[in-house]
Image: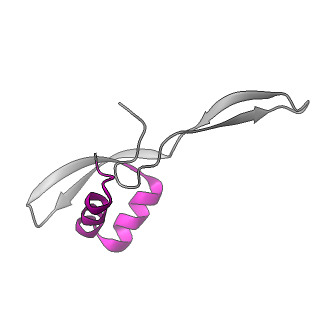
Amino acid sequence: MSRVCQITGKRPRVGNNVSHANNKTKRKFYPNLFKKRFYIPEEDRWVTLKVSSTALKTINKNGISAVLRKAKANGVIL
């Protein structure tokens, strides 16, 4: 399963490990993802989403229905 947030679209980014001697080797920065179940009262069902911690904060602030609506409009939801 890919490491992509289903709300924000965050993906792994590529960067460098930099040693004390300034040697550089490739590495990945992974998003902070959680597999979480949400209840949608309008549809009277549960959905399981893989979301980042940033998306969780947004859902807590705006509500799951509003966030899903916005994600579908932006074409991010998978």
Q: Residue at x 41, y 58 (%)?
A: 55
Q: Quadrant of the C terminus?
A: top left
Q: Is residue 65 left or right of residue 7?
A: left
Q: Residue at x 40, y 47 (%)?
A: 5
Write down the quadrant of residue 64 in the picture. bottom left
Q: Is residue 35 above or below residue 44?
A: above
Q: Is residue 44 left or right of residue 75?
A: left
Q: Is residue 56 left or right of residue 42?
A: right
Q: Is residue 53 left or right of residue 47?
A: right
Is 8 in front, or is 38? 8
Q: Residue at x 85, y 28 (%)?
A: 23
Q: For the magenta stretch, what is the residue range?
A: 51-77
Is 74 in front, or is 31? 74
Residue 59: image location, x then y, percent: 34, 65
Q: Is residue 25 above or below residue 34?
A: above
53 magenta-colored:
yes
Q: Quadrant of the N terminus?
A: top left
